[in-house]
Image (cartoon, rainbow, N blue to C red):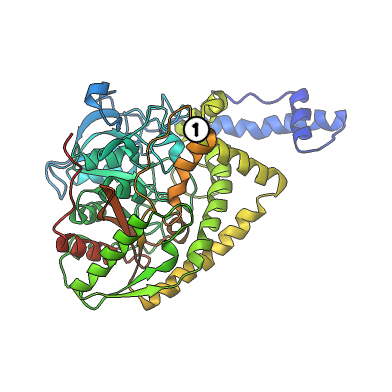
Amino acid sequence: MPVRPPDETEVAALAASYGMKPTAEEVAAYTPIVAAFLSSYDAVEELYAGIAPQAPADRPSTRPAEADNPLGAWYVTTEIRGAAGGPLAGRTVAVKDNVEVAGVPMMNGSHTVEGFVPRQDATVVTRLLEAGATITGKSVCEDLCFSGGSHTSVTGPVRNPWDPARTTGGSSSGSAALVASGVVDLAVGGDQGGSIRMPAAFSGIVGHKPTHGLVPYTGAFPIELTLDHLGPMTRTVADAALMLDVLAGRDGDDPRQPADVVPEQYAAALGGDVAGLRVGVVAQGFGWAELSEPGVDDTVRAAAGRLRELGIEVVDVDLPWHRHALHVWNVIATDGATVQMIEGNGYGWNYEGRYDPELVAHYGRQRREVVDRWSPTVTAVALAGRWSYEREQTRHYAMAQNLATEVRRQYDAALADVDLLVMPTVPMVAPEIPAPDDPVETRVARALEMIVNCAPFDVSGHPATSVPAGLSQGLPVGMMLVGRRFEDTTPLRVAHAFEQLVGGFPPPPAR
């Protein structure tokens, strides 16, 4: 569609939006100049049409009936069979609905994406299919993925298989519920503030947030370039490692990935002797005022103590920057999401990589029409971020990104003395799902209160595995193991050894 150039009245309005006060003669002069600039936009659109992908026509999907979707975890179901053989042959996978599966509707939990059908598979989807997996559907995620609860998707709440009145956690809520309930073997999750690990902890499964840049994010809806992660959600550590073997490595299209990324052999590393490793229990990961539940803290300390039975040395670690890091994340996530995800129509600008112009256009048009239907968390981020942008020139984002280097250095320094850091994944067991008519303050609290231990490692980029540590009040408790960057094998090895030590992780009770 040709770009209509502005007339003189519109050029004057554009100038006024910058605070300019051009004369009538200047406006008249600039109007044809602007039109000349915009003529290249038409040329680019015509050129792009020659390389634009076309969505496959042979991937039908269905919105499941409520009776077939009791946890509210599916957005759509499908059946896309991968290669005849491969490491994931015969395994079923749910793909979080912020990740593009060509020809299958994508909603990202939000009215702003509703109705969009991608034309290309995300890199992780291509790799899963090449490894023999069968993709059986898109799992519900939270509204634009900005919630650690499971109540903000416009399709309705995702219910915890352990207690349907409680949250599954988010934003990879559907992925967690489907894996925990045994509906699928594996799931793709996404993590910008804990959204793989938190629902894994609440649902009693394994969630691994890889080192930032290890798994390509290409083809997934972004929140913030420096925080975006994709990773596996599974019932066992062995499956998480196997899935990471398939997902990891450069694709050449994602600027989040360093040029020298070389994946380890994750599945092959499991089962070896972990004796002699040294694990640090981070004091600041426990005892969060008004958040931490004694039963959760005690369960994780007890689980960490059991690592000694494996010959692992367990020591206490004091790391004050763990508490500071949450503030750094808050600023990066608020300003970064506002500029990239909201003002930047999802993808933002100024980096080399693969964009999705169709998604940018669909989202950009639609968000202006449905802005009043955002979840309270997205609304709060948009309001705070716009205030920062207009009044503070996003200078705090610049400070926070500089501080991110110090956050990383502090964790690196701690990990020079120990091989892993340990703490609760989330400070509480799954709370009850808030009602739609609960106060905004309650719905925001239920969406963000659980991020305190997870979000700092999205800033630092360190790999982190959440594994079930036991039960409190009859509900799952997650233990998080954090390793050195690009040494994802270490948390996975210890998580696997712990899983074997305790005899595996229990499923939810039959209902």
- Position of residue 200 in the picture relative to residue 460 (left or right): left
Query: In the figure, residue 458 lies in which quadrant?
Result: bottom left
Q: Secondary structure at mark 1?
A: loop
In-image side of 23 versus 430 (left or right): right
Q: In this view of the protein, which residue sits in the foreground, 390 or 47?
A: 390
The residue type indicated by label 1 comes to: Ser
Instruction: Confirm whether residue 222 shows in the render.
Output: no
Mark 1 Cα shell of 10 Å, populated few (<14), some (14-19), many (≥20): many
From the viewer's perspective, tell me whether residue 191 is left or right of residue 14: left
Residue found 18% across the figure and 56% down from its top: 238
Query: From what the image shows, is residue 418 above or below residue 161?
Result: below
Please report the residue visible at 51 percent of the width from the left and 67 percent of the height from the top: 321
Identity of the residue drawn at 40% across and 68% down: 282
Q: Can you give x and y, in whole percent of width and height, for residue 36 in the image?
A: 68, 32
Give x and y (percent) for residue 302: 27, 64
* Residue 471 at least partly seen: yes
| Residue nearest the viewer, comparing 111 with 265 | 111
Kindly identify which residue carries mark 1: 375
Please state the horizontal and vertical placement of residue 66, each as a whole percent of the image.
27, 22
- Horizontal and vertical percent for residue 484? 36, 68
Which quarter of the rendering shows the C terminus? top left
